[in-house]
Image: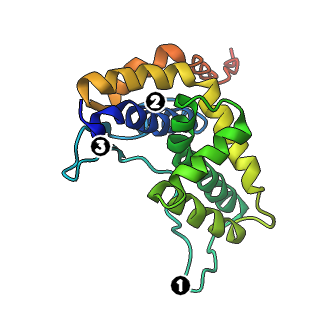
Amino acid sequence: MNVASQYLPLVAHHEAGHAVAAIVLHRQTFDDDHELPAFSSVSIYPDVGDGECGGVVEGAGFYSAQGFTSKRKPIFEDDMDRCLERDDAIREIVACLAGPFAESAFEGYLDPRDMAMNASDGNEGSSDYADAKRIYGELRFLMPRRPRWRRIEDRTARLVLDHWSAIEALAAHLLVKRDLQFDEALTIVAPHLPPMPAATPPERHPQPA
Protein backbone atom coordinates (compact mmCIF):
# COMPACT_ATOMS: atom_id res chain seq x y z
CA MET A 1 0.00 0.00 0.00
CA ASN A 2 1.47 3.36 -0.99
CA VAL A 3 1.47 6.38 1.30
CA ALA A 4 -1.46 8.02 -0.49
CA SER A 5 -3.63 4.91 -0.10
CA GLN A 6 -2.98 4.88 3.64
CA TYR A 7 -4.76 8.21 3.87
CA LEU A 8 -7.72 7.16 1.74
CA PRO A 9 -9.91 6.18 4.76
CA LEU A 10 -9.34 9.65 6.19
CA VAL A 11 -10.34 11.23 2.88
CA ALA A 12 -13.40 8.96 2.68
CA HIS A 13 -14.57 10.11 6.11
CA HIS A 14 -13.86 13.73 5.18
CA GLU A 15 -16.03 13.60 2.07
CA ALA A 16 -18.68 11.52 3.85
CA GLY A 17 -18.80 14.24 6.51
CA HIS A 18 -19.54 16.87 3.86
CA ALA A 19 -22.14 14.66 2.17
CA VAL A 20 -24.00 13.63 5.31
CA ALA A 21 -24.02 17.21 6.59
CA ALA A 22 -25.47 18.38 3.27
CA ILE A 23 -28.27 15.80 3.52
CA VAL A 24 -29.06 16.59 7.15
CA LEU A 25 -29.05 20.35 6.58
CA HIS A 26 -31.19 20.10 3.45
CA ARG A 27 -33.75 18.16 5.45
CA GLN A 28 -34.17 21.22 7.64
CA THR A 29 -35.44 23.09 4.60
CA PHE A 30 -37.15 20.58 2.29
CA ASP A 31 -39.81 17.96 2.99
CA ASP A 32 -38.63 15.79 0.10
CA ASP A 33 -35.03 14.63 -0.35
CA HIS A 34 -35.51 14.71 -4.13
CA GLU A 35 -37.16 18.13 -4.33
CA LEU A 36 -33.69 19.62 -4.54
CA PRO A 37 -30.95 16.99 -4.07
CA ALA A 38 -28.34 17.95 -1.48
CA PHE A 39 -25.55 17.24 -4.01
CA SER A 40 -25.05 15.41 -7.29
CA SER A 41 -22.20 13.03 -6.37
CA VAL A 42 -19.51 12.27 -3.79
CA SER A 43 -16.15 10.81 -4.83
CA ILE A 44 -12.68 9.93 -3.56
CA TYR A 45 -9.52 9.52 -5.61
CA PRO A 46 -6.63 7.25 -4.56
CA ASP A 47 -4.11 9.40 -6.43
CA VAL A 48 -4.84 12.75 -8.02
CA GLY A 49 -1.56 12.72 -9.95
CA ASP A 50 0.82 14.13 -7.38
CA GLY A 51 1.02 11.17 -5.04
CA GLU A 52 -1.81 12.42 -2.84
CA CYS A 53 -5.38 11.22 -2.57
CA GLY A 54 -8.34 13.55 -2.69
CA GLY A 55 -12.09 13.77 -2.93
CA VAL A 56 -15.01 16.01 -3.76
CA VAL A 57 -18.73 16.47 -3.18
CA GLU A 58 -20.13 17.87 -6.42
CA GLY A 59 -23.10 20.16 -6.66
CA ALA A 60 -23.50 20.90 -2.95
CA GLY A 61 -24.25 24.43 -1.83
CA PHE A 62 -26.69 26.50 0.17
CA TYR A 63 -25.32 30.00 -0.17
CA SER A 64 -23.76 32.04 -2.97
CA ALA A 65 -23.80 35.64 -1.62
CA GLN A 66 -26.22 36.69 -4.34
CA GLY A 67 -27.95 39.87 -3.32
CA PHE A 68 -24.81 41.83 -2.49
CA THR A 69 -23.71 44.84 -4.50
CA SER A 70 -20.08 45.62 -5.23
CA LYS A 71 -20.11 47.79 -2.10
CA ARG A 72 -21.19 44.77 -0.05
CA LYS A 73 -24.54 46.31 0.67
CA PRO A 74 -27.20 43.62 0.93
CA ILE A 75 -30.29 43.96 -1.22
CA PHE A 76 -33.39 42.19 0.05
CA GLU A 77 -37.05 42.64 -0.71
CA ASP A 78 -38.04 41.99 2.91
CA ASP A 79 -36.82 40.64 6.21
CA MET A 80 -37.84 37.10 5.27
CA ASP A 81 -35.37 37.12 2.37
CA ARG A 82 -32.65 38.32 4.71
CA CYS A 83 -33.45 35.57 7.22
CA LEU A 84 -33.38 32.88 4.54
CA GLU A 85 -30.03 34.13 3.23
CA ARG A 86 -28.62 34.25 6.78
CA ASP A 87 -29.75 30.70 7.55
CA ASP A 88 -28.32 29.43 4.25
CA ALA A 89 -25.00 31.11 5.02
CA ILE A 90 -24.75 29.40 8.40
CA ARG A 91 -25.68 26.03 6.88
CA GLU A 92 -22.97 26.50 4.27
CA ILE A 93 -20.36 27.15 6.95
CA VAL A 94 -21.41 24.01 8.83
CA ALA A 95 -21.30 21.95 5.62
CA CYS A 96 -17.79 23.27 4.86
CA LEU A 97 -16.51 22.42 8.34
CA ALA A 98 -18.18 19.00 8.53
CA GLY A 99 -15.48 17.39 6.37
CA PRO A 100 -12.52 18.44 8.55
CA PHE A 101 -14.54 17.69 11.69
CA ALA A 102 -15.32 14.17 10.42
CA GLU A 103 -11.58 13.70 9.87
CA SER A 104 -10.98 14.65 13.49
CA ALA A 105 -13.61 12.22 14.74
CA PHE A 106 -12.06 9.45 12.63
CA GLU A 107 -8.72 10.22 14.28
CA GLY A 108 -10.30 9.85 17.72
CA TYR A 109 -11.06 13.47 18.68
CA LEU A 110 -14.58 13.14 20.09
CA ASP A 111 -14.74 16.13 22.42
CA PRO A 112 -16.18 19.08 20.43
CA ARG A 113 -13.40 21.48 21.47
CA ASP A 114 -10.63 18.98 20.70
CA MET A 115 -12.34 18.12 17.42
CA ALA A 116 -12.48 21.79 16.41
CA MET A 117 -8.84 22.45 17.33
CA ASN A 118 -7.57 19.39 15.45
CA ALA A 119 -9.70 20.20 12.40
CA SER A 120 -8.44 23.77 12.34
CA ASP A 121 -4.79 22.78 12.79
CA GLY A 122 -4.94 20.27 9.96
CA ASN A 123 -7.10 22.24 7.52
CA GLU A 124 -6.61 25.95 8.24
CA GLY A 125 -5.30 26.70 4.76
CA SER A 126 -7.73 24.44 2.93
CA SER A 127 -10.57 25.54 0.68
CA ASP A 128 -13.04 24.25 3.28
CA TYR A 129 -11.80 26.71 5.88
CA ALA A 130 -11.24 29.49 3.36
CA ASP A 131 -14.86 29.24 2.19
CA ALA A 132 -16.17 28.98 5.76
CA LYS A 133 -14.22 32.05 6.92
CA ARG A 134 -15.28 34.07 3.86
CA ILE A 135 -18.95 33.34 4.47
CA TYR A 136 -18.56 34.02 8.19
CA GLY A 137 -17.18 37.44 7.28
CA GLU A 138 -20.23 38.10 5.10
CA LEU A 139 -22.62 37.26 7.93
CA ARG A 140 -22.15 40.75 9.32
CA PHE A 141 -24.06 42.03 6.29
CA LEU A 142 -26.92 39.63 6.95
CA MET A 143 -27.55 39.96 10.67
CA PRO A 144 -26.97 42.62 13.33
CA ARG A 145 -24.78 40.33 15.40
CA ARG A 146 -23.03 37.24 14.11
CA PRO A 147 -23.09 34.02 16.12
CA ARG A 148 -19.71 33.33 17.67
CA TRP A 149 -17.40 31.17 15.56
CA ARG A 150 -17.19 28.72 18.46
CA ARG A 151 -20.96 28.33 18.46
CA ILE A 152 -20.86 27.33 14.78
CA GLU A 153 -18.01 24.91 15.51
CA ASP A 154 -20.07 23.35 18.30
CA ARG A 155 -23.04 22.96 15.96
CA THR A 156 -20.80 21.25 13.41
CA ALA A 157 -19.28 18.92 16.00
CA ARG A 158 -22.72 17.94 17.26
CA LEU A 159 -23.94 17.21 13.73
CA VAL A 160 -20.92 14.99 13.03
CA LEU A 161 -21.17 13.13 16.34
CA ASP A 162 -24.95 12.69 16.15
CA HIS A 163 -24.70 11.25 12.62
CA TRP A 164 -21.44 9.33 12.95
CA SER A 165 -22.95 5.97 11.98
CA ALA A 166 -24.20 7.55 8.73
CA ILE A 167 -20.75 9.01 8.02
CA GLU A 168 -19.03 5.69 8.70
CA ALA A 169 -21.47 3.80 6.47
CA LEU A 170 -20.98 6.21 3.57
CA ALA A 171 -17.19 6.24 4.00
CA ALA A 172 -17.11 2.43 3.91
CA HIS A 173 -18.98 2.40 0.60
CA LEU A 174 -16.74 5.12 -0.83
CA LEU A 175 -13.67 3.01 -0.08
CA VAL A 176 -15.17 0.25 -2.25
CA LYS A 177 -16.88 2.13 -5.07
CA ARG A 178 -15.01 5.49 -4.93
CA ASP A 179 -17.86 7.39 -6.64
CA LEU A 180 -21.50 7.56 -5.58
CA GLN A 181 -24.39 9.47 -7.10
CA PHE A 182 -26.77 11.25 -4.74
CA ASP A 183 -29.47 8.58 -4.81
CA GLU A 184 -26.91 5.88 -4.01
CA ALA A 185 -25.49 7.90 -1.13
CA LEU A 186 -28.96 8.65 0.22
CA THR A 187 -29.87 4.95 0.16
CA ILE A 188 -26.76 4.18 2.24
CA VAL A 189 -27.25 7.05 4.68
CA ALA A 190 -31.04 7.05 5.14
CA PRO A 191 -31.24 4.03 7.54
CA HIS A 192 -28.90 5.89 9.91
CA LEU A 193 -30.94 9.11 9.97
CA PRO A 194 -34.11 9.94 11.90
CA PRO A 195 -37.21 9.53 9.73
CA MET A 196 -38.36 12.66 7.99
CA PRO A 197 -41.47 14.19 9.58
CA ALA A 198 -44.70 13.35 7.82
CA ALA A 199 -46.14 16.17 5.77
CA THR A 200 -49.05 17.89 7.48
CA PRO A 201 -52.21 17.21 5.46
CA PRO A 202 -54.20 20.26 4.41
CA GLU A 203 -57.20 21.15 6.53
CA ARG A 204 -60.50 19.82 5.29
CA HIS A 205 -63.37 22.20 5.64
CA PRO A 206 -66.89 20.81 5.73
CA GLN A 207 -68.77 21.38 2.53
CA PRO A 208 -72.14 23.10 2.71
CA ALA A 209 -75.07 20.70 2.40
Circle nearer the N terminus (2, 3): 2
Residue at 38 percent of width and 19 percent of height: 187
Q: Which residue is mark 1?
A: 70
Q: Say what secondary structure mark 2 lies in.
A: loop
Q: Which residue is mark 2?
A: 33
- Tag 1: amino acid: Ser
Spot occupied by residue 166 in the image (x, y as percentages of width and height): 50, 21
Observer-side mark, 1 or 3, equals 3
- Tag 2: amino acid: Asp
Q: Quadrant of residue 89?
A: bottom right
Seen as rendered, the residue at the extreme right is 145
Seen as rendered, the residue at the extreme left is 49
Left or right? Give the position of 12 relative to 192: left
Circle nearer the N terminus (2, 1): 2
Query: Which label number is shown at residue 53?
Result: 3
Circle nearer the N terminus (1, 3): 3
- Tag 3: amino acid: Cys
Query: Could you give the CA–CA distance between mark 2 and mark 3, rounded to whole angstroms?
Result: 30 Å
Observer-side mark, 2 or 3, equals 3
Q: Say what secondary structure mark 1 lies in.
A: loop
Residue nearer the viewer, 128 or 73: 128
Query: Could you give the CA–CA distance between mark 1 and mark 3, rounded to whole angstroms?
Result: 38 Å
Spot occupied by residue 135 in the image (x, y as percentages of width and height): 59, 63
Classify 10 Å Cα crowding around label 2: few (below 14), some (14-19), many (20 and above). Answer: some
